[in-house]
Image (tube, rainbow, N blue to C red):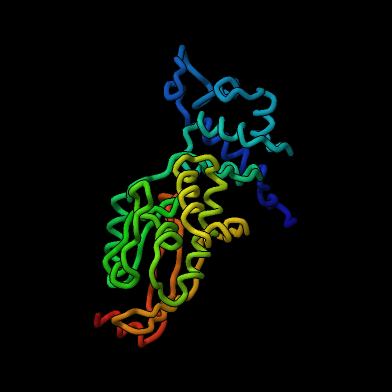
Amino acid sequence: MILGLAPPPTRRDELAEFLRSRREATSPDTVGLSVNGSRRTPGLRREEVSQLAGVGLSWYTWLEQGREITPSPSVLDALARVYDLGPAERAHLFHLAGVALPVSGGPYPMEAPVELRDLVIGLEPNPAYLIGPRTDVLVWNGAAAQMFGEPSRAPDGVANLLWWMFAEPGPHGLGWSATARSTLARFRAEHARRYGDPAFVSLIKDLMRESPRFRELWRRHEVLDAQIGTKTVDHPGLGRLTLHHLQSIPTSHPDLRLTQFVPADDATRSALAGR
């Protein structure tokens, strides 16, 4: 160590400072506490945090002292509620504590947020679409409709990629089987996060009844997350097209998936520009 320079803070030091800063920034009245007289401590006292979060005072004090202890996810969530942390701050708290962030299993959007809808439509002339965790189609822009057709509706009346890919008869283009398989693998990962969700259960039952291919692949337990790749499409009017595609997770709505396509070669670029 260079003389006069302090060593860099550890993760525990950063956690301690983060907790102290949020405690000092939390006004007692925002958590339902009345203030009688003057307070020498800005924000909340450690004793008050302990009571509000339902954790031991000594345990919380050790966290603010940077001790080598590992809080449980439930303790961190309790502190996040007391300090009214937003999603980014909550994730930061878990990362500093060295604790895996619990996967989301709560409610998810059933309709496209306005800003994401405008984004998908604004990506034309390139195909793009937005889906929910169950592969329900929330937005499908005009270029996607011209390129791939229109997704069909599941028995519950909701446009759904899995139902379109596995339960709808008729000829499909090159790569359809591989796309269906990867879509199912991503659905499978989402299903594990939302096990027992009635909407997932009903879709799976309907697909198991209607599609032998779905039944076969479901038993394989294949799992994927968001991905990037290149797809070849045999279009009846434009010929063979090669497209780069990316499925990404909007940080503003992490339960949704945005898929975008761009030309991968000059021939495809020219074909799309002149369609």
**x, y percent for residue 122:** 27, 64
Q: Which residue is found at the position 34% from the left and 79% from the top?
A: 235
User: Which of 220 and 258 lies nearest the eye of the viewer?
Assistant: 220
**Count of labels shown?**
0
Q: Is residue 251 visible?
A: no
**x, y percent for residue 132:** 41, 51
| Side of 21 relative to 271 (left or right) | right
Q: Quadrant of residue 103?
A: top right
Q: Quadrant of residue 268?
A: bottom left
| Side of 227 relative to 117 (left or right) | right
Looking at the image, which residue sits at the far bottom? 267
Q: Which residue is found at the position 59% from the left and 58% from the top?
A: 223
Q: Which residue is found at the position 30% from the left and 85% from the top?
A: 270
**x, y percent for residue 15:** 62, 41
User: Which of 24 and 241 lies nearest the eye of the viewer?
Assistant: 241
Q: Is residue 125 above or below residue 101?
A: below
User: Which of 158 and 50 lies nearest the eye of the viewer?
Assistant: 158
Looking at the image, which residue sits at the far left? 274
| Side of 10 relative to 193 (left or right) | right
Q: Quadrant of the C terminus?
A: bottom left
Q: Is residue 111 visible?
A: yes
Q: Quadrant of the N terminus?
A: bottom right
